[in-house]
Image (cartoon, grey):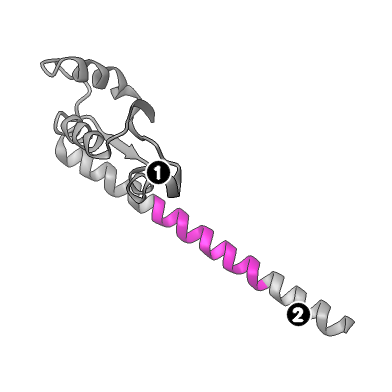
Amino acid sequence: MQLIARYEDALEAEDVAARLEHAGILAYVSSVNSHLFGRIQTGALKVGLWIVLEHQYEDALAYLQDEEHDITTALSAQEIEELRSRTQSASYDFFNRVLIYAAGFILVAGAALWYVVRNHV
């Protein structure tokens, strides 16, 4: 992923991302949720617009300069949706694995603490 721009207005960033995706360039806007809660609470002053696939970066820059630019790396709407689905699935799998390992660690640490307290009190 490569950062293409930062925006103070999350809606503007989302609009640009939607235009890029309509043109076949997979984009992601970061810090949207943090930005929506307010700058004072989260410290998020801007949101980032990222190009997900490195090989689409130059096309994205050219398209943002001139919407008549002929995009050579465009994906179909189906390809974009498939990539999103796979990415989301991989994220959930990773998060679930982290939770399982954390739960296992907590159980082992709790059992060890119980053993130490029981045998040394």
Comparing 73 with 27, the one in front is 27
Q: Main secondary structure of the magenta part?
A: helix
Q: Can residue 2 be seen by looking at this rendering? A: yes
Residue at x-position 76% and y-position 80%:
114
Q: Position of residue 16 (x, y in %)?
A: 21, 31
Q: Give the label, 1 or 2, closer to the camera.
A: 1
Q: Position of residue 119 (x, y in %)?
A: 86, 83
Compared across the picture, whether 96 is left or right of 24 comes to right
Residue furthest left as drawn? 68
The N terminus: image quadrant: top left
Q: Is residue 102 magenta?
A: yes
* Residue type of the residue flagged with mark 1: Arg
Between discs 1 and 2, the one toward the N terminus: 1
Q: SS of the residue at dot 1?
A: helix
Q: Position of residue 40 (x, y in %)?
A: 43, 46
Query: Which residue is disc 2 drawn over?
Result: 114
Q: Quadrant of residue 78?
A: top left
Q: Is residue 99 above or below residue 121?
A: above
The C terminus: image quadrant: bottom right
Q: Position of residue 46 (x, y in %)?
A: 37, 35
- Magenta extent: 91-107
Q: Is residue 114 above or below residue 78?
A: below
- Say few, some or many: other residues with alpha carbon within 10 Å of mark 1 (under 14 / 14 to 19 / 20 or more): few
Query: Which residue is disc 1 drawn over?
Result: 39
Compared across the picture, whether 1 is left or right of 24 comes to right
